[in-house]
Image (cartoon, coloured by chain):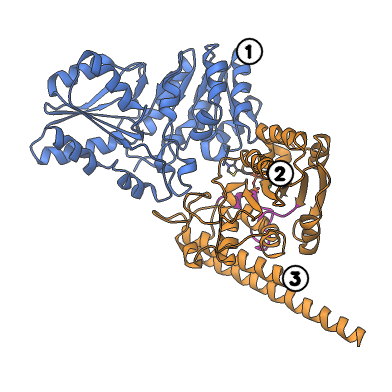
Chain colours: A orange, B blue
Amino acid sequence: MYNRTRVCEQAVKIRLDIITMLAAAGSGHPGGSLSAADIVATLYFGDVLNFDAKNPQDPARDRFVLCKGHAAPVLYAALAQAGYFDKKELLNLRKLGAMLQGHPDALKTPGVEVSTGSLGQGLSIACGMAAALKAAGGPQRVFTLLGDGELQEGQVWEAALFAPHYRLDNLVAIIDSNGLQIDGACCDVMALGDIAGKFRAFGWDACEVDGHDIDALHAVLSAAPCADKPRAIIAHTEKGKGVSFMEGVASWHGVTPCEKQAREACAEIECAGNEARDRARDSVSSEGGHHG
Amino acid sequence: MGKATRAAYGATLIELADEGLPITAVEADLSGSTTLSKFGERYPDRFYNAGIAEANMTNVAAGLALEGNIAFTGSFAIFGTGRAWEQVRNTVCYNDLNVKLAPTHAGVTVGPDGGSHQALEDIALMRVLPHMHVLVPADFNAARAAIRLAAATPGPFYIRLGRAEVAEVHASDFVFELGRAYVLREGTDVTLAACGIEVAEALKAADLLAADGISAEVIDVACIKPLDVETLVASVSKTGRIVTCEEHSVLGGMGSAISEVLSEVCPVPTRRIGVADTFGTSGSPAELIEHFGLDAPSIAAAARELV
Ligand SMILES: Cc1ncc(C[n+]2csc(CCOP(=O)(O)OP(=O)(O)O)c2C)c(N)n1
Ligand SMILES: [Mg+2]
């Protein structure tokens, strides 16, 4: 059952874990992990993905491919929260011998469907999974999360041709459209133009959504498939979302906070989480009053 | 510690362009990491950012070269040589174009990003290509010299650059000669042939061996293609044994290149130090050098086995 408050709480926990594990690791990618936190929280805790953390290879599960593999911390936080492995592992991120590698490693980490980190490859992998699942006649769906800069890889558009050609209506590609990549704003580095329009022109069912609005995300992610068409969801997000000094700042792509910055960041995330919970409670009680 | 080899990239391209050479550079969203951003700031009309698109980057460089430019490409070694390999083969090398690949972040010293980002196959991938030249500078000064050599010599080049800081082993006026290996320390009992950051490790290993009364000759095999067969044969004719040392897979890299040649013209007992047919992993550069047995004690141990 979808419960907005639960997803919001999980998103807060995911953000806190992202900051904590990256500060402990001393390297990694906060910006693109934070921008995707609400999307990933909705997938795992908003009754979208069907999964069993105790049985990661359950054939009945939906698949999630983190195409933008450098955002590994957001996936690790969600997997730990979901019970795939002990949360203590988060603090070993990127260390020698760790289960949690700098980029997702399917041979080491339960819940990681496939190793990624080389941009532009995941959508093709997701196409292959979706094609196999469709051929087998199963109800499982395949979700994948791409960066907007990542869309510059030609392979993404090879996959974008493949998916509608094979009528992969069990495939959902989410674009974390935060407007930034490493060398700056996507529009300055290599402009992407109308992303939704491009996917539509390739034969996809495409929609745009506020990537930080949990209800809106839940609605598009759980919507019934559009007959015969794969779906592209362009999620408008802010890189570094939730940590004001990181928000919209390209240089926070691959730099980690020092201890003091991490403390400030966590305080801000917690404070925003508490305010949101109070607002939710108020609106529930005023609704209650109205009905009474 | 001296500067990282990558630090030479942007700065040397500026020097060359200032000297009047028709230098252009094409990047794939990593201009800060490769230091090509410096060149881009100085020469904005000779710098192109292809975005995250390594195949396109490579063939845009090919087109620039066809129009008379000396075109350098960026990105990380794993993507610049791997993702775009067939573009390098069928466009850059098949046409013998003046394209110079000098992507950075080769080897395990990439560190915590992990195995997906640690190129351990790039020397192998590049040296099998006809027309390609392969340079592996040992330090910042050699990297600068390698870039100058590539710019001055027509045809495709691969210059292997790293992210980590590395000890200086060459003087600042070092001149890189095509097809030449450099004997840095003379010895009589064993040859240590190294490239890249392993040159500094081999020099340290020679000190460890000297303490045991073993005299090691250290050669910087800075140019892997064409290989300086003469210098290598002269050395092993004297020492009778060789340890090859590289921050690369033991399959297909410098050790393989040397073994291929020596097995034909002067076979000697050989040990190859490198990453043993496995992927890299997350860790700090120093930890990984030790973890994969690329450190001076491991080199010295291999040499002792042979002597
Ligand atoms: C094939 C490939 N080229 C380059 C990189 C290096 N790289 C890592 S993240 C990144 C920028 C990604 O930008 P975007 O897709 O917009 O991700 P986000 O903003 O969500 O972090 C680059 C160039 C890579 N991992 N893979
Ligand atoms: Mg982005």
- Pointer 3 chain: A
Residue A71 versus residue A215: which sits nearer the camera?
A215
Q: Is disc 1 in the same subunit as disc 2?
A: no
Residue with the mark numbered 1: B67
Gap between marks 3 and 1 measured at Cα? 61 Å
Q: Is mark 1 within 8 Å of ligand 1?
A: no
Q: Is disc 3 in the same subunit as disc 1?
A: no
Gap between marks 1 and 2 measured at Cα? 49 Å
Q: Nearer the viewer, mark 3 or mark 1?
A: 3
Residue with the mark numbered 2: A134
Q: Residue furthest front?
A: A136
Residue A241 versus residue A68: which sits nearer the camera?
A68
Instruction: Inspect the image, locate mark 1, and give the three-letter code of the amino acid beneath it.
Output: Glu
Report the magenta residues as a range: A236-254
Image side of residue A143 versus residue B70, left or right: right
The quadrant of the rendered image in which ligand 1 is seen is top right
Give coordinates of residue B99: x percent, y percent. 53, 19
